[in-house]
Image (tube, coloured by chain):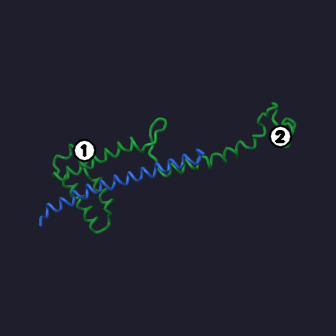
Amino acid sequence: MPVAIFPALVYWWAIEFERAEADFLRRRAAIILGALRRRTEDAQPI
Amino acid sequence: MASSIIEDIAALEEQHQYGCLTDLEFAAAVAGVLPVRTDDAAGHPVWLTAVANEVTQLAAEWKREQLDRHAIPVRGGRILPSRWLAAVFCAGPVVGIPLFAFFFGPRSHRLPTAFGKPVGRRGRPSSLSC
């Protein structure tokens, strides 16, 4: 039983970690892209 | 210092505009260019300092979350889970059990029995077969 359960548990844990990391990267990208977009809009007012 | 960072970001923005970098790659490259130390932020424009602080705060939160929530506690520290680790967990017993049988299986008939003497493969005492 442990031979099957431990790898499955670690795999599930790794998937959760990858999801959280992707979420972090998305949030960081949103912050950076938003800041750069705001700067561009401020520099070129319509 | 500040101007070189801004030039780097402008170069990355140009690559992003031409489609050489995806949004995530572009953001990662900008995060790599952003200053890490706060004492370097003196000559920076406000927007650059603000975004650097925000990114630093988010990265610190992520590091803390990694340690508190995602790391697997093992003796002497913590390790982050990965698919490779799961594969090693899976392959360990799969490889280890046949290896154990390969090395120790041939000698298993020499283990002492309930009657005290080891027994050979055909039921003869192993002392006679030697």
Tell me if mark 2 has few (under 14), some (14-19) or many (20+) residues whose alpha carbon lies within 10 angstroms of its own: some
Where does residue B53 sit, x and y in percent of width and height? 23, 47
Residue holding disc 1 = B37
At 45% from the left and 37% from the top, the residue drawn is B77
Where does residue B116 sit, x and y in percent of width and height? 81, 30
At 18% from the left and 59% from the top, the residue drawn is A38
Q: CA distance from mark 2 to mark 1?
A: 73 Å
In the figure, what tint was chain A given? blue
Residue B18 lies in quadrant: bottom left
Residue holding disc 2 = B120
- Pointers 2 and 1 within a single chain: yes
User: On what subunit does the disc labeled 1 rest?
Assistant: B
Where does residue B85 sit, x and y in percent of width and height? 50, 48
Where does residue B115 sit, x and y in percent of width and height? 82, 31
Amino acid, disc 1: Arg
Q: Is residue B46 above or below residue B26?
A: above
Q: For the N terminus of chain A, which image quadrant?
A: top right
Amino acid, disc 2: Gly
N-terminal of the pair, mark 2 or mark 1, is: 1
Q: Nearer the viewer, mark 2 or mark 1?
A: 2
Q: Nearer the viewer, residue B124 or B45?
A: B124
In the figure, what tint was chain B given? green
Callout 1: SS? loop
Q: How many marks?
A: 2
User: In the image, is B19 to the left or to the right of B125?
Assistant: left
User: On what subunit does the disc labeled 2 rest?
Assistant: B
Residue A41 lies in quadrant: bottom left
User: In the image, is B83 to the left or to the right of B46?
Assistant: right
Q: Nearer the viewer, residue B130 or B63?
A: B63
**Are the residues tagged 2 and 1 within 8 Å (C-beta)?**
no
Q: For the C terminus of chain A, which image quadrant?
A: bottom left
* Residue B85: numbered disc: none
